[in-house]
Image (cartoon, grey):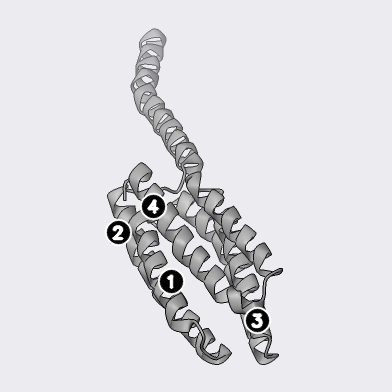
Amino acid sequence: MATLHQFKEDEEKVKEEPPSLHGRAMDNLEFIRGTMQNSTEFTAVPGYGGALMGVTAIVAAIVASGQTWRFWLITWLVEACLAFAIGLLTMWQKSRLVETPLNSTPARKFAVGFAPPLLAGIILTAMLYFNGLFEYLPTAWLTLYGTAVITGGAYSVRAVPIMGWMFLALGAAAVFIPAGFGNWLMGVGFGGLHIVFGLIIARKYGG
């Protein structure tokens, strides 16, 4: 009887092993999936959307040219809101195309890197506005936007941080040129760079 009882216990252990192995395999798969997701680049950066943002920025530079500083500021703030809407919409569309949800780990890393410099730009814009120092806005905007693109782009495709460094270079150049040329540097940066790199991203990374 003892032998038969021991045999039944061994049989029950054998029956329990497959679910246990299955559970461990599923845990391993979840770990591998999570590791791959964490190391994936954020590829939902919109190429054609970025190019469209560039077109609207060139229009803004033309409209704002030769106007008073207050009208200039209003024009570019409207452009910023329009560009943000275009970027968000086209990013959402591309995220569905490349199957990278906007709540994925790469997307969150991109947002965490991108947001702080933009927040600093908003604060600095308010400070310069209330002190009437409008001529310093192109430098601040180009520099901080470039920083945002670099830090956010560290989790994206290679073209993104490269574009950020070029924005940073334009911001540095704005320090040494007459204030009246700041508007055209904005056009070159937010317009030209967005168009060029937008088309590069669209061609290499699917839209």
Reading the image, the residue beneath label 2 is 93
Which three-letter amino acid code belongs to the residue tagged 3? Glu
Measure the C-alpha gap from mark 2 to mark 4: 8 Å
**Other residues around mark 3 within 10 Å, as few (<14) / some (14–19) / many (≥20):** some
Q: Which residue is mark 3?
A: 135
Whether residue 123 is visible, yes or no, is no
Q: Which mark is residue 44?
A: 4
Return the x and y of residue 33 as percentages of the image width and height: 42, 37
Please report whichever mark, 4 or 1, sits nearer to the chain's N-terminal start.
4
Q: Looking at the image, do the residues carrying marks 3 and 4 touch, with CB atoms under 8 Å apart?
A: no
Question: Between marks 2 and 1, how big is the CA–CA gap?
Answer: 21 Å
| Quarter where residue 123 is shown | bottom right
Residue density around tag 2, few if under 14, some if 14–19, many if 20 or more, within 10 Å: some
Q: Quadrant of residue 62?
A: bottom left
Q: Is residue 4 above or below residue 179?
A: above
Q: Earlier in the sequence, mark 3 or mark 4?
A: 4
